Image (cartoon, helix red, strand yellow):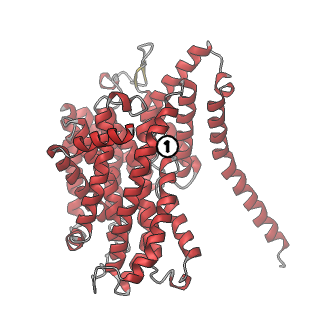
């Protein structure tokens, strides 16, 4: 009952004229960036961080959340009509959706995507509403050792899952941890890694780092390497509405996709890519029409799109209850919280209930707005694909420059922005994930603080981390995350070698 009362008060906050308008702007922008290839929610939120520094925190965070799940909603349009995923999470949608479009069934493909996204988003938000308070109750029992162990798990899992290899992900993480150490030590007041530069005494501004990595670095990479092909847009043919048979074949994949997507969003598993592929494999196995897969099976669009959107809602649960980001966009939203002097976690539910519940309530409203925006206005979203890419990239760089300079009117911030942007470009060029840098930079100082508190409590006894049951369990899981994939790769290599020796010459 307390949860329902809190949700009702959240609706009162979300339905205020200002927050309703910001939510509408967020989901509209999110749909647009989901449609545009190479422009994702992480880049967009990073660009808007400087511009929203003076906003009311509740309204700004409602807008950022709208951009996030709006991009998940809108990414299917590009995948289906252009066979170019606007977001990495819509790669699976492109496999079947574009084949449906080639067969003249672009309308039903877009419809099952939009309706499935609405169904999954609404169910996942309901789960977020009722599961979050239980997670908060558990998190309130955590001490410094448990928090440190959970942060180590987040570091390792995000780094191991993202990128081409765990080694590259961990290298990116350690770069972020190093950046997070720059500035004055919180306990001793000693300068660390400042190189004698006064501007570094306060540390690197997380907004500048986020904009440099995701806006400048990503834009330079896309403009350099992904601007060499001519895209062919499939034309909309026939009715946009789903037939009775389409509904019959879609509703179960929507529910199964939701059941896969939400749990994966809640754990540090790299976002929506894994549940979308799992959903596709599940639907292919359970389908009564397996021969259609690869040729335009509607289940192959319905299930992955539901998993995609449910995962986006699930991502907000560890972010709000523990302050742990599990995706790149969640890491930048965490930076937005810190921009307003807020630290997500269990205490925020007590100290800022209107913000937390207003944000959750806005997701119900946003899902309805997105359904109304996506289907009737699909022609408008398709026209966005005709924007010349050089103009798009130039506009992003201009906004990034203005935003970074406007933070403190400092030339040093501009130099830092483009220095980090070049670093982000090089990382993308060599397939080193950039998200762990931001995760390490934001959570690094917090994990150091919890580590020091744990050592102070135990009077320097490091065994406290393995004698406390919860922290010991979490650290054991962390070790398994690192060791098991390596052992599995070694076993596969040995089997392949054995088969090679046994085969006749």
Q: Nearer the viewer, residue 150 or 120?
A: 120
Q: In which quarter of the view is residue 181 placed?
A: top left
- Give the residue drawn at x 48%, y 23%: 449
- Give the residue drawn at x 17%, y 43%: 16
Query: Does residue 235 appear anywhere in the picture?
Result: yes
For the N terminus, the image quarter is top left
Q: Can you say whether 505 is above or below 86 in the image?
A: below
Q: Which residue is mark 1?
A: 172
Point out the residue furthest to the left here.
17
Residue 407 appears at what percent x and percent y? 21, 34
For the C terminus, the image quarter is bottom right
Q: Nearer the viewer, residue 426 or 351?
A: 351
Q: Can you say whether 307 is above or below 212 in the image?
A: below
Q: In which quarter of the view is residue 418 placed?
A: top left
Query: Does residue 40 appear anywhere in the picture?
Result: no
Residue 452 appears at what percent x and percent y? 53, 19
Neighbourhood count class around disc 1 (C-alpha, 10 Å): few under 14, some 14–19, many 20 upward: many
């Amino acid at each position: 009952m307390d949860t329902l009362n809190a949700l009702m008060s959240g609706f009162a906050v979300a339905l205020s004229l200002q927050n309703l308008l910001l939510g509408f702007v967020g989901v509209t922008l999110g749909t647009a960036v989901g449609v545009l290839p190479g422009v994702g929610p992480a880049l967009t939120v990073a660009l808007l961080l400087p511009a929203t520094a003076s906003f009311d925190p509740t309204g700004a965070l409602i807008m950022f959340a709208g951009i996030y799940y709006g991009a998940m909603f809108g990414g299917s349009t590009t995948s289906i009509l252009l066979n170019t995923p606007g977001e990495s999470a819509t790669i699976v949608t492109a496999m079947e959706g574009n084949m449906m479009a080639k067969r003249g069934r672009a309308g039903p493909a877009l419809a099952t995507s939009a309706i499935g996204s609405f169904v999954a988003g609404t169910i996942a938000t309901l789960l977020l509403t009722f599961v979050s308070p239980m997670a908060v109750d558990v998190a309130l029992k955590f001490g410094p050792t448990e928090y440190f162990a959970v942060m180590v798990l987040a570091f390792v899992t995000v780094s191991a899952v993202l990128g081409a290899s765990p080694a590259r992900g961990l290298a990116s993480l350690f770069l972020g941890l190093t950046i997070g150490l720059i500035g004055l030590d919180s306990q001793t007041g000693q300068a660390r890694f400042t190189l004698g530069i006064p501007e570094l005494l306060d540390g690197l501004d997380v907004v500048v780092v986020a904009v440099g990595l995701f806006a400048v670095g990503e834009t330079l990479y896309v403009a350099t390497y992904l601007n060499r092909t001519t895209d062919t847009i499939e034309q909309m043919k026939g009715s946009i509405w789903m037939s009775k048979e389409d509904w019959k074949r879609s509703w179960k994949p929507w529910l199964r996709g939701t059941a896969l997507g939400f749990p994966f969003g809640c754990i540090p598993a790299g976002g929506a890519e894994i549940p979308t592929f799992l959903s596709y494999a599940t639907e292919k196995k359970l389908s009564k029409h397996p021969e259609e897969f690869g040729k335009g099976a509607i289940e192959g669009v319905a299930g992955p799109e539901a998993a995609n959107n449910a995962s986006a809602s699930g991502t907000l649960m560890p972010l709000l209850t523990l302050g742990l980001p599990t995706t790149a966009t969640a890491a930048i939203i965490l930076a937005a919280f810190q921009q307003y002097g807020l630290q997500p976690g269990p205490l925020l539910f007590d100290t800022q209930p209107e913000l937390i519940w207003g944000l959750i309530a806005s997701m119900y409203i946003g899902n309805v707005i997105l359904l109304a925006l996506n289907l009737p206005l699909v022609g408008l979203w398709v026209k966005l694909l005709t924007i010349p890419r050089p103009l798009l990239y130039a506009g992003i760089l201009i906004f990034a420059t203005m935003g970074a300079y406007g933070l403190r009117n400092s030339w040093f911030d501009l130099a830092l922005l483009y220095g980090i942007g070049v670093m982000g470009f090089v990382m993308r060029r060599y397939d080193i994930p950039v998200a762990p840098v931001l995760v390490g930079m934001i959570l690094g100082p917090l994990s150091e603080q919890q580590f020091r508190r744990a050592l102070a409590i135990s009077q320097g006894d490091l065994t406290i981390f393995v004698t406390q049951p919860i922290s010991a369990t979490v650290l054991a899981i962390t070790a398994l995350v690192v060791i098991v994939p390596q052992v599995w790769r070694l076993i596969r290599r040995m089997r392949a070698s054995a088969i090679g020796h046994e085969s006749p010459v």
